[in-house]
Amino acid sequence: MKRMQQGAPSRRRRLVTALVIGTASVVALAACSSGSSSSSGPGTNSGKKISLKIADWGDFGLKGLIAQYKTLHPNVTITEVTGDYNTTHQNLQKFLVAGSGAPDISAIDEGFIISFRNQASKFVDLGKLDASLKSAYIPWKWDEATQGGQTIGLGTDVGGLAMCYRTDLFKKAGLPTDRNAVSKLWPTWDDYVATGKKFEAGIGNSKTKFVDDGVTIMNPILGQQPVGYFDSNNKLAMSGGPKLAWDIANKVISAGLSAGLPQANATAWAAGFKNDSFATVACPAWMLGQIKTNAGGHGVWDVADIPGGGGNWGGSWWTVPKQGKNTTAAADLVKWLVQPAQQIAVFKDAGNLPSQPALWTNPAIADYTNPNANNAPTGKIFTAAAVKLPNPPQFLGTKNGAVRVAVELDLTAVEQGKFNATSGWARAQKDAEKAAAG
């Protein structure tokens, strides 16, 4: 959730420096031997039978990597438990409080990382795995997972923004289908709403809407603002970016452009791809994995610019809770997962763009065209978006995850007709205050 800011020349100089340093770091990473900062249990190279559980959500591109790791380490059994986004984080918090039950490895998203890093003593310090790891990452990606010198997570990806759209449905509605022409339709979010109205007028099918859900519009708009739910002093700041994002999302809803299929309702949302329920979806890099999984070849998806320009939505970390019995082996696996070869494989499989800048210029990523997105040059599209991400990013706050969930639920209630935009906003403010105080 970061907004593209002014001052690009100076950031570009910093990025070039980071790329040079990062290239050396990637080489060093690949050359380093396996190791762990924890003495709990044997390492994966011990030959002893080890079982590891990974908790995540969505698509982290692990299926092929798990099979590959099993070939390299026949003694290690890995189980991936893919659950609901919010539930995954809520369960991890419960396990940390209880002192048991946590997975060996847990993904944590950007909206929750600050809350968990404040509990750093409950996680293995992954920063001690290798001295070269830190310089491989975007500085803020390392810093956001670090508290008191302890790094609780190694970054998986960043989610610079674009907009994915169905070329076949655009053609039926009489709209252009070329990605450059589509980008010119919506330089602003008001233009996006106007384009949606043209789409609805031309599609001739009341069951096909322009966008999947209002929440999918609210989140990227908020990610483009300099201040999100919290200001840099960790104080709730609902009147700025959140109100703007809420208002534009409600323009989409009131214009009848939304299919009312929130991503939180994973089953119905996934079915929407196959039922021609929506023609556009806000598209951070990781969304391409969702399209690959859920569209199943149904409809021709492509990638255009995001209205408003810039922004970030998403990006996660791998963490190792200390309460596990196999923290050494878990840390070994995490270290392997963030190596260049594995990060490139994840990008090609699930779309997740690595948070190691040296990989952005690697031809395997920079020149990649996505067969599941009409051969769009997603390597160029998303690395260009990543280069523009500010450092430091938008401050998310210790209670950002809880506040975001509360506000999203209230927007969904508006979409379901339980409140209007005004009464829904009043409720969202109160619920945000409760979540921030909780």
Image: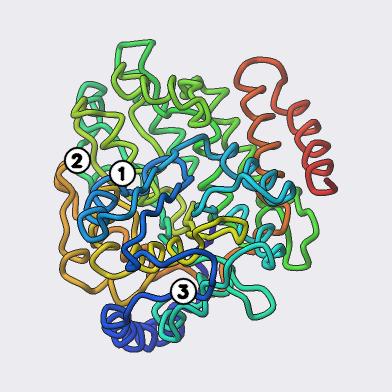
Callout 1: helix, strand or loop?
Answer: helix
Q: Nearer the viewer, residue 310 or 354?
A: 354
Instruction: Using the numbered discs, state the Cα–Cα distance from disc 3 to disc 1 in whole angstroms.
Output: 33 Å
Q: Which residue is at a point 40% across and 54% down the rendered structure image?
A: 50
**Local secondary structure at mark 3:** loop
- Marks 3, 1: nearer the viewer: 3
**Mark 1, residue position:** 288
- The percent position of residue 253, horizontal first and vertical second, equals 55, 25
The C terminus, quarter of image: top right
Density class for disc 2 (Cα within 10 Å; few <14, some 14-19, many ≥20) is many
Identify the image quadrant of residue 68.
Answer: bottom left
Q: Earlier in the sequence, mark 3 or mark 1?
A: 3
Q: Is residue 298 above or below residue 379?
A: above
Q: Amino acid at mark 3?
A: Ser
> What's the distance in space between the residues labelled 1 and 2, CA to CA?
8 Å
Residue type (three-letter) at the residue carrying disc 1? Leu
Which residue, given by chain and number where applicable, does mark 3 sit on? 36
The circle drawn on residue 372 is 2
Quarter of the figure with the N terminus: bottom right
Q: Quadrant of residue 336?
A: bottom left
Image position of 192 (left or right of 221): left
Q: Residue at x 66, y 22 (%)?
A: 413
Q: Are marks 1 and 2 in contact (CB under 8 Å)?
A: yes
Closer-to-camera residue (431/62) = 62
| Residue 60 image offset from top left, x and y in percent | 37, 48
